[in-house]
Amino acid sequence: MRYTQAIREKRDRFQAYREAGVVSTHDRCIVALNSGGLWPHVEGVGLPRVLSAVFPIGNERVTLDAKTGKVLRIDHEYRGEILRANGAEIPLTAFLDPEYAQISGIICDSARVTGWRQQGNQRFVSTNNPTATTPLPLGFFGLGTEFRSERNGDGFTLKRHERKISGVPVGAG
């Protein structure tokens, strides 16, 4: 819920800048988020949580071959919204919604105020908006894990790309 609220607020602020003539319709809007304030926060296995704030990504399902135990397929349930305690629906489909088309992508960092050098640059997660009016090119951020989304019929696919910059700390571990 914190991610969706922050994205909505930043979208609205960018739209106000556009209406005031501060930015043009050809400028890219990249929303930067940080989950470090949610610490202690343990990221689960599979896809980073920030992706489920902009795409309808639900629980992960793994299909195994019963004889060999090999993974045949990994997919996710559709989850288009979450419910607040009061029953209000919060959509999780921003990057499939034309109201968010002015956002080109997001980058999320999980560093806390202390210890960022020890956490390395792999903590960065980014994704493009497949419906953006001003799209991001592949590799735009150049570090961390980029999830490239593309329309696929009625849905979308995500491809994972790892990025490293030489000379940047990669962690103490």
Image (spheres, rainbow, N blue to C red):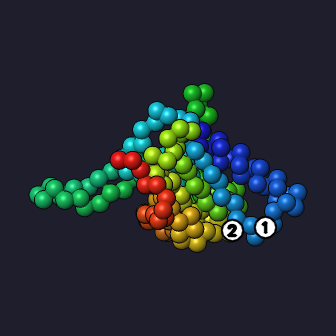
Q: Name the residue under label 1.
A: 25
In this picture, residue 143 sits left or right of residue 2:
left
**Identity of the residue drawn at 21% across and 56% down:** 64
* In the image, farthest residue toward the right: 20
Q: Which residue is farthest left?
A: 67
Viewer-closest of 72 and 127: 127
Q: Which residue lies furthest to the top in this view?
A: 86
Q: Nearer the viewer, residue 134 or 125?
A: 125
Q: Where is residue 23 in the image (x, y as percent from the top left)?
A: 81, 62
Mark 2 in CB contact with mark 1 (< 8 angstroms): yes
Figure check: 20 above or below 135? above
Where is residue 4? Give x, y as percent.
61, 44
Q: Kindly tell me whether residue 149 is visible in this rendering.
A: no
**Vertical relation: 93 (above or below) 167:** above
Q: Mark 2 points at which residue?
A: 133
Density class for disc 1 (Cα within 10 Å; few <14, some 14-19, many ≥20) is few
Name which residue type carries label 1: Thr
Residue 90 sits in which quadrant?
Answer: top right
Quadrant containing the N terminus is: top right
Which structural element holds mark 1?
loop
Asked whether residue 117 is in view, the answer is yes
Numbered disc 2: secondary structure: loop
Vertical arrangement, residue 89 with respect to residue 66, above or below:
above
Residue sitting at 33 percent across and 50 percent down? 61
Task: Tell me: 132 left or right of 48.
Answer: right
**Category of crowding for the residue at label 2, using alpha-carbon neighbours closer than 10 angstroms: few (below 14), some (14–19), many (at least 20):** some
| 157 relative to 113, above or below | below
Q: Residue 118: image x %, image y %? A: 45, 46
Residue in the image at 53% along x and 35% along y: 38
* Image mark for residue 1: none
